[in-house]
Amino acid sequence: MFLCRNDTMKRKMKKIIIANYKMNPQTEREAVKLAHAEDREGVIIAPPFPFLIPVKKALKKAMLGAQDVSTVSPLAGGWGAYTGAVSASMLKKMGVQYVIVGHSERRGFFNETDVMIAKKIVIALEAKLKVILCVGENADVRAQGITPAKAFVAEQLQKDFSEIINNKSAFKNIIVAYEPIWAISTTLYRKDVTLEDAETMAEYIKEQYPVRVLYGGSVNARNASGLLAQKNIDGLLVGGMSLKLKEFKKIISNF
Ligand code: 13P
């Protein structure tokens, strides 16, 4: 770990908003229509794999993100007999600039481990993709208080960054998204994050690593401006509301 708070602050960058479409919408036509309408500077659109190329063609200002990448390294070939896998080099060649890694839905539904996530980070960076690493605690951990929640996130970061910890320049191409699972819109019995909670965790992450930090979890037109106004929150990772054009337009009107 290294203290690089000043480095991060020196790199004063514009806030960013990521639209994570998850496994939506149902057709290419809808995806292209949505992305075209959400095409703004500072926005990153992350559609499902089959819609990456048509969405890319529809974008003039926004950047393109993928929602996942394979653990098969481009340096080890990056192609071959890996059914269902999409490599970092394929994404790069398609014009993808960012890749989301370690989303809680991949950790939870697809049993992704921190070892796999650490590998994906290295592979994505080798292919010159920027990484959006998602971390965040579940409701049980948060119920014990902010200190255990911080410890949980710190452990995730420590494990996920284990392969790059001695490579300070790698962190220039990494964004961390703090997404507490208990605040995600599709979580049963979800709860609203407070501005204080989100800001405290963003600050905590920046105290340890020289990264930009986003917040994600039920971001909507009502809470976006408050979240974006926080000193340590550099942007938002939006799920459900990135599929609702009116809401998303209101969210991005805040920057
Ligand atoms: P929601 O905005 O639907 O809560 O999703 C958050 C998320 O998981 C974004 O990656």
Image (cartoon, rainbow, N blue to C red):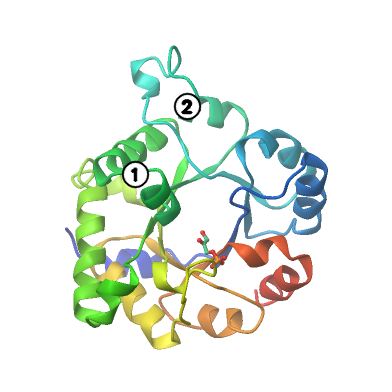
Asked if residue 102 shows in the view, the reply is no
Which residue is disc 1 drawn over? 111
Left/right placement of residue 140 relative to residue 59 reads left
Q: Earlier in the sequence, mark 1 or mark 2?
A: 2
- Where disc 2 sits, the SS reads loop
Nearest the camera: 209 or 107?
Answer: 107
Name the residue: 39% across, 37% down: 125
Which residue is disc 2 drawn over? 87
Name the residue: 26% across, 46% down: 114
Looking at the rendering, which quadrant does residue 51 occupy?
Answer: top right
Within 8 Å: ligand 1 and the Cβ of disc 1? Answer: no
Mark 1 or mark 2, whichever is nearer to me: 1
Q: Quadrant of the N terminus?
A: bottom left
Q: Say which amino acid is labelled 1.
A: Asn
Compared with 36, 10 (above or below) is: below
Left/right placement of residue 103 relative to residue 51 reads left
Asked if residue 94 shows in the view, the reply is yes
Name the residue: 39% across, 87% down: 196
Name the residue: 20% across, 54% down: 158
Left/right placement of residue 99 relative to residue 223 reads left
Residue 243 screen position, x and y as percent: 70, 60
Residue 49 screen position, x and y as percent: 61, 36
Compared with 98, 92 (above or below) is: above
Q: Say which amino acid is labelled 2.
A: Ser
Q: Quadrant of the C terminus?
A: bottom right
Residue 206 screen position, x and y as percent: 30, 68
